[in-house]
Amino acid sequence: MSPIRLKMKGLGIIIIIFLGHLSAPGQLAFEKEIKENTDILLLNEISGNVILKNHSKNAIHIVVDDFKPAPKEAAGLEATFGKNDNTKMGLELTDQNNLLVINGASRQSEQTYTIFIPEKLRLRIKMNSWNDSSWGKKSEYRNKWGHDGIIKCVHLNNETEINSKYHNISVLEPRSPVVINGMMGKIKLHLSEYKNVDIIHISTISGQIELTLDATVSTGISIKSYQGEIFKPAHFKLEDITKAMGSSKLGWQYFQGNFNNGKGKILLESTYGNIILRTPTKDE
């Protein structure tokens, strides 16, 4: 990305205009072209918050907020985290045949990475490490276990698989299949339409699942719960098929339903967490 610099003499002001994504003060940006044979992107154990969006470039473009420089005592030195921070923002990018890997390369956990990716890549996210250096602070991203961190996918056309033990996960209007395996974090999914998506499968151990469906969404839905509660609007009709599944004595509950004669498949499963079905609020 090439910046254009405009300097106003006498005022000491430099205005930097970037062609493409804009970088605000305090942000760092990094971009890498994608090889022709690359078809999988893996995000692996990244500390902090991660927001993913599509763009039209054949490149990975990353912008980070609040990534702190080394302390003055360590000026000019590099952090050793078992990874090579070749982005200078706490991330390591490596190419492995058809796989592009973005590894976490920093212990910092209060920064937010916004990652722009092309639609052609299959997205895999693995975040199973504890991610918190701000214990006791209030945070919109903190879950009930005291862990900070969110994975947020916004209008992605990529086939997506997320495996995370602690992060809160938010998926807004996916346009391709989504599989999420969680453990403790909250998982939110918002669908305003359901096109070109064969299946959405969300499972968690003790995290809460919240599914928001617009009135126009057309899909089938299956729900499996052990000790969690299931909440829904009165007009959402679900059939209890627990006995048919032969699981009533084991404690599991099974429900299925269909909205607007849909052919899509949504599977929701939580062992101990609640499952909430809802319609959008006025602000959504």
Image (tube, grey):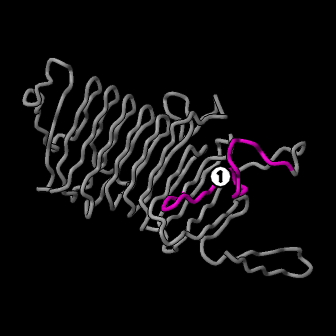
Residue at 16%, 36% (x, y): give it.
Answer: 255
Which quadrant would residue 3 be assigned to in this image?
bottom right
Q: Position of residue 189 (x, y in %)?
A: 35, 48
Residue sticking out furthest to the right: 10
Q: Position of residue 66 (x, y in %)?
A: 69, 51
State the predominant SS element of the stretch in magenta.
Answer: loop
Residue at 40%, 41% (x, y): give it.
Answer: 187
Task: Decide if residue 277 is on the left or right side of residue 6.
Answer: left
Residue sticking out furthest to the top: 249
Q: Disc 1 residue type?
A: Leu
Which quadrant would residue 183 be assigned to in this image?
top left
Q: Which residues are magenta?
A: 77-100
Residue at 20%, 55% (x, y): give it.
Answer: 264
Q: Position of residue 102 (x, y in %)?
A: 58, 54
Q: Which residue is mark 1?
A: 91
Q: Nearer the viewer, residue 32 or 278?
A: 32
Placement of 234 over or under 86, stated as above or below:
above
Quarter holding the C terminus is: bottom left
Placement of 60 over or under 131, stated as above or below:
below
